[in-house]
Image: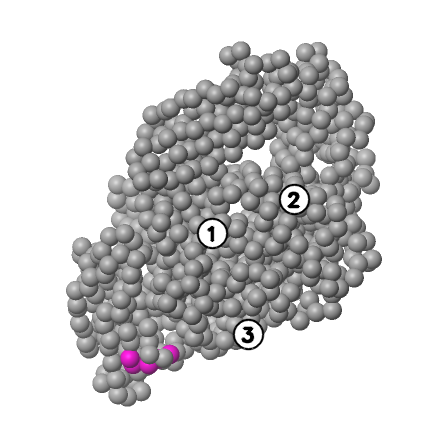
C-alpha cells in the first residue's frame, strides 16, 4: 500500500453563526466561495470592501467525507498533508482534534496512522483573523504598522497585505488555500530530494541527496534516478538506499546553459527520482533544472562603495524588472494560466528579473515554472515586511518551519537568483522615526531573526543560492542600510517627496530595487469598479480605490508641473500613465548610462491585487499601462538614450547601450524638426558598441535653432537607432515642458491590414503627436508598441498577434479603434 489520495475538490462549508451549508472548492477560500455563490457583494465594486471586511470577524468551517478500503485503513503509515491553511485552523478527523495551525506559509503534515476508518470526516475550523489580531494589538506594546496596514497583523503569520497596504484593501480572507492529500504507505516515503550543481570547464556535475522515511525496515529500497536533457536524451542511475538515504551523481558533458531572458536560451533538464522496493515504485519526485551559476557580486571596485551585481554563468548583468505583489486579494482567482500570462508579459517587456516582495506569500509553483521557461530571475524575499516582530518561542518555531518548507520547495528552480531576509525592516530600524520608542528587545530580535536564525535556516536548506540580509541593505547590522553607494537602494524622493523626475540623475545607485510613480488604470478598468458619477478622483469611491493617502492630489501636482489640465477622467488616467512612464524612464536610462557602477532597476510595482490607482505597470485586469510599454523600450538590450545637459537644455548627449554578448553595429540618426514635421537639422552617424557596454556617441548643441520663443515651443529633437535597416530604438526630447509646447490637435488616419499571423495597424497624423495611445472598444490585446510618438508624415505601424483576437477581424479592429495623444486631452 503506497499511494497518495487527493482530498481536493468539493467540500462543504458554513459560517459559525449560520445553519446554512454551501458547497465550496479546495484549494480556495471563503471569499472565493462566497463570490462564486453570490453570497456577498463584490468587494472590489465601489466601496464594498468595507462591508465585505466585516465578514471576517466571523468563524468558518469546511468539511468533507471520504471513503477508504480496509487495506487503505490498515496502511502502516498514514499522513494528512495540508499544503496551505489560512490561517487560524483547528483540524478534526472523525471528531478528534489532530492539528492546531496558525501559519499560512507552512506545510502541515499530520500523522493519522491508526485513526482512519471506512468512512471518514475531515473538518477544518477557521477562527477570525480580525478578532485575533485586534485582541493581540490591545495587549501589545508594538505600535508600528505599515501605511494602510491594520495594527496587530505582526502577530499572525498570514500574508500582511491581506490586512491592507498603501495599494491594497483590507480583506483578510480565510480557507484551505492550497492542496490537501492523504499519503498512505507500507514501505517508505520520500522526505527530501536535494539537488546541487557544480560547474567545471565544459561540464556540470549534478548531485542528488535523497532522504526517505522508512516504514518497513525489512524493505530493500533503491532510488532510480533519471536525468533527461532538453533534447530528450536520458541517463538513468540506480542507487541503493541505506538507512533511508542515498546519493546519486550525474555528469553532463557540454551542458546546455540556462540564461535569463535576452542573454540566451532557457533549456531545462528533467530530474525524476523513483523510490522503489522489489521493482515496484513506492514514491516519486519530479522537477526541472536549468544548468547555470548565479550569485551576487559585492566586491569593491573603482567607484566609491561596493558593487551589487547579479552574476549569471560568470557574466555580470544589469538586472531589469519590477516588484511582484500577490496577484489578487481573492485567492481562488489566482490560476496557473493567469500567473503564466503575467510572467509572459514580463518577458515581453524585456524583463530579466522580478522581486517577489516580502509582504505577501510565497507564490504557487506556476509562477516559478513560468519564470524558468521565460528566463525571469527571481529575487525572493522571505515573507517579512515593514513590521516589528516579537521573537517568542512559538513564533520562532513557525518562521523556521515556513522558511524551510518554502526554500526546499523552490530551491531547484533555474530562476532562483537570491533569497532576501525581509523588506525594509533593517532600514526602518536604522532610520524611521515611526519605529522610535519600541523596546530595545524588538530591535535585538531583528538581528537574531535576520542575521542569525534565518540565514542559517536558508543555508541549511539551500547552500547554493545567495542570501541577502534585507532590502535595502548595505550588508547588515544597521550600517546605513539605504546607502546609495553600497548594496541595494529604495528611492522614493521622486513621488513621496514630490521631487522632479530629473532628481534621479543626481544619484548613481549600485542597484535600485524599489522606486516608483503612481497612475490610474485605463478607463475600461475604472468602469469595472465605479459608476460614471464616481469618476471624479476626489469622490469617495475613487479615494477608496487609492490607498496612498494624498496620492490623488500628488498625481495632480505632477500633472500641473508637466501638462495642461486634462478635460475628463479618461484623459486624467491617460496623462497620469504618461507621467508614470516618463518618471521611471528617467531613472532607468540614467542608471543604464552608468552601467558597471549601477547594475539593477526593479521598479515598484509590476501588478495589482485589485482594481486601484497604484504604482503598477499592469493593472488588475491585465491591461498594460503606458509604463509597461515603456519598459519594453527602456529595458531593451540594444538601445539609444538622450540625456540633456540639464532639464530643457538645448545641449543633448546621445548614448548607445548594448546589454549583450556580441558587439553591435548600428546607425544613429538625430533629427530636429518643427511640430508640422519640417526638418531643420539632421545627422546620421555609424555607431559600434562592444558587449556589455555603454558609450556617449554624439553631443549636440541645438542653441542656434532655438533662438526665439516660438522655436523653443515648437521644436522636437528625435533620435532613431537602426540595426540592419530596422528601427530598434527611438525617442524624442522637448525644449519646453509639454504643457508649454505648441501642440496642434492631430487628425489621424488608420488602416488595419491582415497578415498571416498578425494584424498590422498603420497610423498617421498631420502634425506631431506625442504618446499616441491605441485602444479598442470591446477587445483587449498587447500591441507591438503603444504610447509612441508620430514624428513624420510616414506614420507608425504596429502589429498584434491574431492569437490574441480569435473572434476579431481587421474590419472589427478598424471600427473599434480609438486614438488618443497628448494634444487630445485638453
- Compare marks 1 and 3 and give the one earlier in the sequence: 1
Q: Mark 2 points at which residue?
A: 400
**Residue 798 placed where, x, y %?**
30, 54
Kind of element beneath mark 3: loop
Question: Which label sits in the foreground, 2 or 3?
Answer: 2
- Residue 500 lies, with reference to residue 45, above or below; the image says below
Q: Distance between the residues labelled 2 and 3?
A: 37 Å
**Residue 308 placed where, x, y %?**
44, 59
Question: Which label sits in the foreground, 2 or 1?
Answer: 2
Q: Residue at x 33, y 36 (%)?
A: 203
* Residue 325 within the segment the image draws in magenta: no
Relative horizontal placement of residue 720, taking residue 141 as reference (left or right): left
Q: Distance between the residues labelled 2 and 1?
A: 24 Å
Q: How far apart are marks 1 and 3 (CA)?
A: 25 Å
Q: Mark 3 points at which residue?
A: 497
Question: Which span of residues is magenta-colored?
Answer: 647-651
**Residue 325 placed where, x, y %?**
55, 52
Residue placed farthest to the bottom in the image? 708
- Compare marks 2 and 1 and give the one earlier in the sequence: 1
Q: Is residue 614 visible?
A: no
Q: Mark 1 points at which residue?
A: 354
Amino acid at each position: 500500500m503506497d499511494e497518495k489520495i487527493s482530498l481536493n475538490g468539493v467540500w462543504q462549508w458554513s459560517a459559525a453563526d449560520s445553519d446554512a451549508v454551501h458547497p465550496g472548492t479546495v484549494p480556495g477560500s471563503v471569499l472565493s466561495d462566497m463570490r462564486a455563490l453570490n453570497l456577498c457583494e463584490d468587494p472590489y465594486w465601489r466601496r464594498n470592501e468595507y462591508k465585505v471586511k466585516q465578514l471576517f470577524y466571523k468563524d468558518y468551517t469546511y468539511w468533507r467525507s471520504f471513503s477508504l478500503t480496509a487495506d487503505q485503513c490498515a496502511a502502516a503509515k498514514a499522513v494528512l498533508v495540508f499544503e496551505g491553511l489560512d490561517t487560524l485552523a483547528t483540524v478534526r478527523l472523525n471528531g478528534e482534534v489532530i492539528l492546531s495551525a496558525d501559519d499560512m506559509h507552512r506545510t502541515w503534515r499530520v500523522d493519522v496512522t491508526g485513526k482512519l476508518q471506512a468512512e471518514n470526516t475531515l473538518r477544518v475550523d477557521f477562527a477570525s483573523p480580525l478578532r485575533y489580531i485586534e485582541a493581540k494589538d490591545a495587549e501589545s506594546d508594538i505600535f508600528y504598522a505599515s501605511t494602510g496596514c491594520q495594527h496587530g497583523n505582526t502577530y499572525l503569520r498570514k500574508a500582511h497585505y491581506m490586512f491592507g497596504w498603501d495599494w491594497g484593501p483590507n480583506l483578510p480572507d480565510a480557507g484551505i488555500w492550497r492542496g490537501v492529500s492523504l499519503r498512505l504507505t507500507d514501505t517508505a516515503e520520500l522526505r527530501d530530494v536535494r539537488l546541487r550543481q557544480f560547474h567545471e570547464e565544459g561540464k556540470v556535475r549534478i548531485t542528488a541527496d535523497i532522504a526517505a522515511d522508512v516504514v518497513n525496515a525489512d524493505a530493500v529500497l533503491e532510488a532510480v534516478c533519471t536525468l533527461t536533457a532538453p533534447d530528450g536524451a536520458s541517463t538513468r542511475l540506480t542507487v541503493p538506499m541505506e538507512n533511508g538515504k542515498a546519493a546519486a551523481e550525474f555528469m553532463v558533458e557540454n551542458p546546455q546553459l540556462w540564461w535569463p531572458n535576452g542573454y540566451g536560451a532557457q533549456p531545462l533538464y528533467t530530474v525524476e527520482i523513483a523510490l522503489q522496493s522489489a521493482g515496484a515504485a513506492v514514491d516519486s519526485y519530479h522537477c526541472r533544472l536549468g544548468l547555470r551559476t548565479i550569485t551576487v557580486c559585492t566586491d569593491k571596485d573603482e567607484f566609491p562603495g561596493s558593487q551589487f551585481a547579479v552574476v549569471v554563468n560568470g557574466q555580470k548583468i544589469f538586472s531589469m524588472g519590477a516588484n511582484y505583489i500577490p496577484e489578487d486579494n481573492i485567492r481562488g482567482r489566482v490560476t496557473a494560466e493567469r500567473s503564466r500570462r503575467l510572467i509572459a508579459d514580463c518577458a515581453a517587456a524585456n524583463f530579466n528579473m522580478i522581486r517577489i516582495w516580502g509582504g505577501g506569500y510565497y507564490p504557487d509553483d506556476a509562477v516559478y515554472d513560468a519564470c524558468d521557461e521565460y528566463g525571469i530571475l527571481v529575487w525572493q524575499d522571505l515573507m517579512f515586511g515593514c513590521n516589528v516582530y516579537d521573537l517568542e518561542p512559538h513564533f520562532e518555531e513557525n518562521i523556521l518551519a515556513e522558511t524551510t518548507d518554502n526554500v526546499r520547495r523552490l530551491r531547484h528552480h533555474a530562476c532562483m537568483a537570491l533569497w532576501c531576509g525581509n523588506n525594509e525592516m533593517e532600514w526602518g530600524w536604522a532610520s524611521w522615526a515611526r519605529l522610535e520608542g519600541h523596546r530595545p528587545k524588538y530591535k535585538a530580535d531583528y538581528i537574531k531573526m535576520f542575521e542569525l536564525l534565518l540565514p542559517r535556516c536558508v543555508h541549511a536548506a539551500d547552500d547554493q543560492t545567495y542570501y541577502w540580509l534585507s532590502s535595502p541593505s548595505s550588508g547588515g547590522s544597521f550600517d546605513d542600510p539605504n546607502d546609495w553607494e553600497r548594496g541595494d537602494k529604495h528611492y522614493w524622493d521622486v513621488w513621496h517627496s514630490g521631487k522632479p523626475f530629473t532628481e534621479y540623475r543626481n544619484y548613481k545607485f549600485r542597484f535600485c530595487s524599489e522606486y516608483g510613480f503612481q497612475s490610474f488604470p485605463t478607463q475600461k478598468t475604472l468602469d469595472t469598479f465605479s459608476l460614471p458619477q464616481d469618476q471624479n478622483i476626489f469622490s469617495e469611491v475613487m479615494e477608496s480605490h487609492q490607498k496612498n493617502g494624498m496620492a490623488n492630489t500628488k498625481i495632480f501636482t505632477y500633472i500641473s508641473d508637466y501638462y495642461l489640465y486634462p478635460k475628463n477622467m479618461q484623459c486624467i488616467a491617460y496623462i497620469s500613465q504618461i507621467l508614470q512612464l516618463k518618471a521611471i524612464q528617467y531613472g532607468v536610462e540614467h542608471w543604464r548610462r552608468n552601467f558597471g557602477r549601477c547594475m539593477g532597476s526593479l521598479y515598484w510595482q509590476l501588478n495589482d491585487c485589485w482594481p486601484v490607482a497604484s504604482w503598477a505597470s499592469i493593472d488588475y485586469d491585465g491591461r498594460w499601462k503606458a509604463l509597461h510599454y515603456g519598459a519594453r523600450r527602456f529595458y531593451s538590450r540594444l538601445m539609444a538614450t538622450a540625456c540633456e545637459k540639464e532639464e530643457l537644455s538645448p545641449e543633448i548627449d546621445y548614448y548607445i547601450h548594448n546589454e549583450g554578448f556580441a558587439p553591435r553595429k548600428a546607425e544613429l540618426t538625430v533629427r530636429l524638426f518643427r511640430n508640422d514635421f519640417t526638418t531643420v537639422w539632421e545627422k546620421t552617424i555609424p555607431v559600434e558598441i562592444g558587449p556589455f557596454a555603454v558609450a556617449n556617441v554624439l553631443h549636440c548643441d541645438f542653441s542656434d535653432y532655438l533662438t526665439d520663443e516660438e522655436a523653443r515651443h515648437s521644436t522636437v529633437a528625435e533620435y532613431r537607432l537602426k540595426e540592419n535597416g530596422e528601427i530598434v530604438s527611438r525617442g524624442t526630447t522637448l525644449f519646453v515642458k509639454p504643457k508649454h509646447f505648441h501642440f496642434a490637435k492631430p487628425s489621424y488616419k488608420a488602416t488595419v491590414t491582415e497578415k498571416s499571423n498578425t494584424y498590422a495597424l498603420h497610423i498617421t497624423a498631420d502634425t506631431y503627436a506625442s504618446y499616441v495611445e491605441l485602444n479598442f472598444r470591446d477587445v483587449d490585446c498587447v500591441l507591438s508598441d503603444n504610447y509612441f510618438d508620430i514624428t513624420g508624415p510616414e506614420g507608425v505601424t504596429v502589429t498584434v498577434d491574431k492569437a490574441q483576437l480569435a473572434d476579431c477581424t481587421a474590419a472589427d479592429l478598424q471600427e473599434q479603434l480609438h486614438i488618443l495623444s497628448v494634444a487630445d486631452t485638453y
